[in-house]
Image: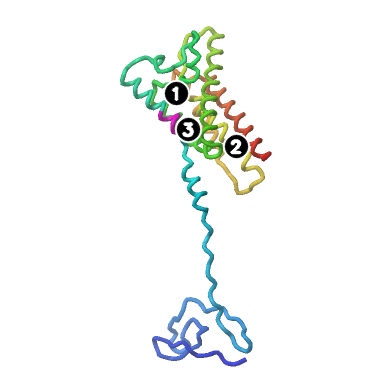
Amino acid sequence: MSETELSVICKNCGSEVSPYVTECPYCGTRLRKRAPKLERSGDRLEALKPRRRRRPRLLPRRASAAIAAERPYATAAAILISALLLLIQKASGDPLATFGGLIVPLHGEWWRFITAPFAYVDVGYLFVVAVGLAIFSTGVERRLGSLPTAVLLIACGSLGMIAASGVASAQGEITVIAGGNGMALGAVAAWFAIRRAESQGAIDQEYDVIGVVVAAVVLIALPLFAPTAGLVAGLVGGAVGGLAGVASSALHSHH
C-alpha cells in the first residue's frame, strides 16, 4: 500500500501533514474536529465523501392546509354563546328564565331543554365549564370533527336536562336548572373513552388518568357551589358522552 498524500498545510508551523489526522504532529495545533472516515481504493486510502442528510418529508400543501383549517368551532361556539347570554343577563338584570333556564315543573316549553345548558347567572360556574370544554371538547373535536362534536355537546346537555327535569318533577320540586355541567362532563367522558381506545396496545401512548378524574370530580361537585347546576344533569350528560365515545371508537376500529 502506498503512502498517503501529504496535502494539508498546518497554519501554525507551516508543515505538511496527512489529511487524515486531526492534530499537527509537529506543533499540536488542532486541524479539524474529527478525522474523516477512510475507505480502500486499490492500494490507497481515500476519505469518504460526507453523505448528504435527507431532509424530512413535509406534508403536502393540501394536507397541511386541511389540518390548519381544522379549528374547534363547535367548542368555541358553545363557550361564546354562553358567555354572551351571561353578559346580556347581567346587563339587563332579567331572571334566568328569560335566557332559557329550565323551570321545573315544565309547562310545555320543551325548547328549554336545549337552551338551558347555555344559560348561566354565575360567572364562576361558566368559567369551570368553559375550562373543561376547552381542554376536553377540543380533543374530541379534533378526532370527530365540528358537526359531530356540536351534536354530542347538545345531546349531553339536553338529555341531562330532560333527566334532571324528570327527577325534580317526580320529587315535586319547584326549581330552576341551568348551565353546561352535563356538556362538560360529556366531553370529558367522550375524550376519555376515545383516548383509552387509541392507547390500547401502544406503549408510547399515555394519557393523564389522574387529570381526567380530577376534572370529572370538579364538574360533578359543581352543584355544591352553583345552585342552578343539576347533579342529575351532569351525571346523565357524562354517561351520554361516554357512550358516544365508546361507540365512536368501536365504529372507527371496524374501518
The residue shown at (48%, 41%) is 70
Labels in figure, total: 3
Secondary structure beneath label 3: helix
Residue type at numbered disc 1 = Phe
Instruction: Judge whether residue 105 can be spotted in this image.
Output: no
Secondary structure beneath label 1: helix
Q: Main secondary structure of the magenta part?
A: helix
Position of residue 159 measured from the top left corner of the image (x, y, whole percent): 55, 21
Residue type at numbered disc 2 = Ile
The residue most toward the bottom is 2
Position of residue 93 measured from the top left corner of the image (x, y, whole percent): 32, 17
Tell me how far mark 1 sits from mark 3, CA to CA. 13 Å
Q: State the residue position of label 1.
A: 118
Residue type at numbered disc 3 = Ala
Closer to us: 217 or 52: 52
Q: Using residue 194 as the reference point, say whether residue 103 is left or right of it.
A: left
Q: Quadrant of the N terminus?
A: bottom right
The residue shown at (53%, 70%) is 52
Q: Residue 104 bears which disc, if any?
A: none
Q: State the residue position of label 3.
A: 74
Q: Which is more N-terminal, label 3 or label 1?
A: 3
Instruction: Judge whether residue 212 can be spotted in this image.
Output: yes
Tell me how far mark 2 sits from mark 3, CA to CA. 18 Å
Q: Using residue 119 as the reference point, say whether residue 46 is left or right of it.
A: right
Q: State the residue position of label 2.
A: 194
Secondary structure beneath label 2: helix
Q: Where are the magenta residues, as a range? A: 75-80
Vertical order, 199 against 185 (above or below): below
Tell whether position 45 is magenta. no
Q: Which is more N-terminal, label 1 or label 2?
A: 1
Q: For the residues carrying marks 2 and 3, which lies nearer the camera in this image?
A: 3
